[in-house]
Amino acid sequence: DDGMRCAAVDLGAGSGRVIVGERRADRLVIDEVHRFASPMVAGPAAGSWTWDVDLIEAEIRKGLAAAEAAGPIDGFGIDGWAVDHVLLDADFRRLGPVWAYRDHRTDGERERVFAEVSRAEIWRRTGIQFLPFNTLYQLTALARLQPDLLARARHFLMVPDYLIFRLSGFLANEYTNATTTQFYGLHGDDWDRGLLAALGLGRLPLAGRPVEPGTILGTIPSSADPARSVAVIAVASHDTASAVVAAPLSSPDDLFVSSGTWSLMGFESPKAFTSPKALRLGVSNEGGWGRRFRVLKNIAGMWPIQRIRDEAGNPSWERLIAAAEAAEPWRSLVDLDDERFLSPPSMTAAVEAACAETGEPRPEGLGALARCVFESLALSYAEVKRALEDLRGRPFARLRIVGGGSRNRFLDQLAADACDLPVSAGPVETSALGNVCVQMIALGALRDVDEARTLVRRSFAVEDFEPRGSVPDPVRRRFRSVGRRHPQETQ
Ligand code: LFR
């Protein structure tokens, strides 16, 4: 299987890339053949956000052509951010815009749903964290606001499923992404049609049971050489699921953070945690490759600092991080997981307002603002680490930070300090790597995820950070008191 080449499309909320992964002897070599911006686009109403999926599709086509121009490819797969979906009519035409999960339509929707079906019941059935924008609430909002669209829908697809359909004609829902909808039933291991029916969504046009990651959907002719065929593979199409496939986890005591727009902190487990305690701690049991659950929590991630950077006129990351390093430590703290930071008109103003409300000093200047955000993020990591340890009843021994955010060495060190754990940072392109690995498993070039991780470990260096033990207890206490953490815990 030496020389097998797979093209991985990895879609982040903001940018996408097409990467070719090639097996060369005992190494995996990757080549980024195309990268493009795919920002959220202002939608028809105020505070409304959508995705330009036509642009994303066109960029993917360019990327695949570039991949094939560099040599024949054996397979391709698409992974991307979760939760957002596409509805198609009987003629396979898209119905309405593709709403982005930060759109304000779902504000308050969760609470309206709980009046029909309780949180405890939804939790028992799905084991999924109550994010305000889960597909479930997007669909109940749609049923309320634009019932005609739902009535005309004949196909329901998640965004990566939709793009696979556009590129190949194969229609399928993939399992890992399906679990993020919050209407995938943990117990029946299939869509939870009963839950949907109880919420007036009984006619949502779901195809059969979602396919497993690693399913070869079929083949299409290569655009470079029509005599060759390319396998179209349903990978672990949720980007976080793909990232975890390729995260170089080497012990059950490894804790991961998949660091991108969001920071997803968690661990792998053969069983889901669905106790009332798990509900109280606000964790999620997302589906992973080979039915290994990703027991994790969404933490704000890089989004707030990306927004602040934009609002400051896009200084380089180097300058921004250097300014943060030069600012006074532990001066202003905010709870970035407060939902006010999901989609505010100005992130800078939102941080300043939060500081004013909790009596934290106002961060003066970009360095202080960035430091406040990085330190608050690291302290969130520490809180979630504690919650996950409490849940599984065992401490973690190492934190593995993977994904684009792992390049931020300042934050890696803060994470080590706040979590009091050694940190290994990297690889950066883990989602694309996991995408490639699942393709290679499907095509028989890799045995399983364990072999994939061994290959990743051999092929990509990681950087280690030791904790310096420098987070004073009063800082941790202050952080807990500024946080109106996990609002669902109080309901
Ligand atoms: C990360 C991610 C998270 C999901 C969020 C919204 O890119 O996929 O796992 O909670 O985006 O889809």
Image: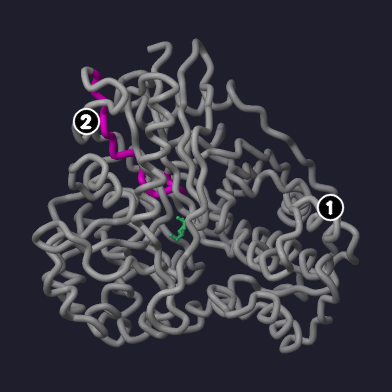
The answer to if 45 sits in the magenta stretch is no
Protein image colouring: one colour
**82 left or right, relative to 485:** left
Q: Residue at x 30, y 34 (%)?
A: 214
Viewer-proximal residue, 3 or 471?
3
Question: Residue 353 placed where, x, y %?
Answer: 70, 85
Residue numbers of the magenta segment? 228-241
Above or below: residue 332 compared with residue 211 = below
Q: Give residue 419's quadrant in the image.
A: bottom right
Badge 2: residue crowd in 10 Å (few <14, some 14–19, many ≥20): some
Viewer-proximal residue, 460 or 146?
146
**139 left or right, relative to 128:** left
Q: Which residue is mark 2?
A: 220
Q: Which residue is mark 1?
A: 469
Q: Quadrant of the N terminus?
A: top left
Question: Residue 377 placed where, x, y %?
Answer: 68, 62
Q: Give residue 425's quadrant in the image.
A: top right
Numbered circle sitting on residue 377? none
Q: Residue at x 79, y 55 (%)?
A: 321
Element at label 2: strand
Asked whether residue 292 appears in the rendered view, the answer is no
Q: Give residue 439's quadrant in the image.
A: top left
Q: Quadrant of the C terminus?
A: bottom left
Element at label 1: loop
Question: Residue 408 placed where, x, y %?
Answer: 72, 48
Q: Earlier in the sequence, mark 2 or mark 1?
A: 2
**237 left or right, relative to 196:** right
Q: Amino acid at mark 1?
A: Gly
Q: Does mark 2 have its CB less than 8 Å from ligand 1?
A: no
Report, in whole angstroms, how far the alpha carbon at label 2 lies from the one at label 1.
Answer: 55 Å
Q: Residue at x 69, y 68 (%)?
A: 308
Q: Amino acid at mark 2?
A: Ile
